[in-house]
Image (tube, helix red, strand yellow):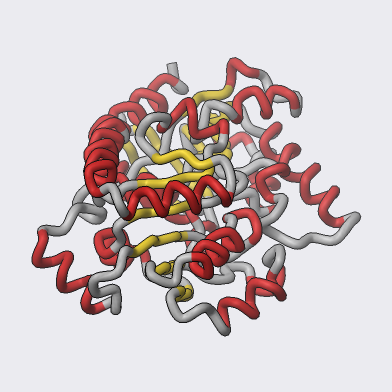
Amino acid sequence: MPIKVNMFSSASKVKGQGVGSAYEELIRLLKTHFPKEIDLSINRYTQADISHYHTIDPQFFVSTFTKKRGVKVGYVHFLPETIEGSLKIPQPFRWLFYKYIIAFYKRMDQIVVVNPTFIDQLVKYGIKREIITYIPNFVRKDEFYQYDAEQRRQVREQLGVQDRFTILGIGQVQERKGVKDFIKLAQQHPEMYFIWAGGFSFGRLTDGYADLKKVVDNPPANLKFTGIVDRNKLVEYYNAADLFLLPSYNELFPMSVLEAFSCGTPVMLRDLDLYHSIIKGYYIAADNYAEMDQKLSALVKNPAQLRDYQQRADQASAEYSEDHLAEIWLNYYSSLLK
């Protein structure tokens, strides 16, 4: 008998956020690899062996009180501290929202985290360590892949990159993503070309919206803000770039980093502790703006180092392959019913 898994999610309603990308990847993986082993349904309140919650909508919270849900699995993509710098929520609503997040997680029988560093933080919130499992994100290789030389030349011409050293950032335009440092780097390096693919997914609720909107509407000549890009077009941007840079101050396990790895694009990141347990050694680490600036200048003069990090991107991509994660998910779901 197949395992009946009901997915609960509204992640696809908001474009340009990693939660939606991770959710869509998992749905596709399960349908592709396990059409007979898993009977999958989405946002249905019928009897299930496992109910897997990807977002914390109030109607989903209410559904956790019915016995039809089977084993309730919560997919933790964020914690209260990771929302700081993303959304501008006034008090007392922020405090209430943060309490609700944890209350939702506490309704779960099992928790899945995409980064092992979040296990200790969840335990501090009163969630039992033994119900938490780490399963990383992944991306599909047939969607995010490395172009050949001619394809790359064409896409660079199409995007207006031409011969300039090009730095790509991807994600929502918000304070937490370190967009202001990205802007400063563009101002500091007029000889390079900078592209930020992403927009204001939550509009005026975005933290720092007013200041960032001014720059987005009137950027330096060598900086382009694309707005929200359809996910199936992102592969073009990764392949056009010489370097992927994500200067975020807080993350879980960014889909954009895995996508860059999958396209063979060298990666530079603000060196957050949470990266160390999952991708350390695969990226160029910079502690702050000054280090990003210094390392960026050095990279342009050192193509051998860029090639080295291209190879490391390939190695990281192999570690987080779809086939490997498919088996992990099937084993995980199966273990919940024993």
How many labels sit on residues?
Answer: 0
Q: Where is 245 relative to 77, above or below? A: below
Q: Where is 73 relative to 262, above or below? A: above
Report which quarter residue 169 is drawn in: bottom left
Query: Where residue 180 sits: x, y (%)?
Result: 61, 63
Q: Is residue 231 left or right of residue 227?
A: left
Residue 74 can be seen in this image: yes
Query: Where residue 219 sits: x, y (%)?
Result: 53, 79
Q: 179 and 330: which one is in front?
A: 179
Query: Where residue 266 sits: x, y (%)?
Result: 31, 47
Query: Where residue 168 sits: x, y (%)?
Result: 39, 61
Question: What residue is drawn where x is 31% and y is 64%?
Answer: 165
Residue 32 can be seen in this image: no
Question: What residue is drawn where x is 69% and y is 55%?
Answer: 85
Q: Where is 232 relative to 336, above or below? A: below
Q: Is residue 99 left or right of residue 182?
A: right
Question: What residue is drawn where x is 38% and y is 54%?
Answer: 244
Question: What residue is drawn where x is 21% and y is 53%?
Answer: 145
Q: 106 and 156: which one is in front?
A: 156
Q: Is residue 5 left or right of residue 176?
A: left
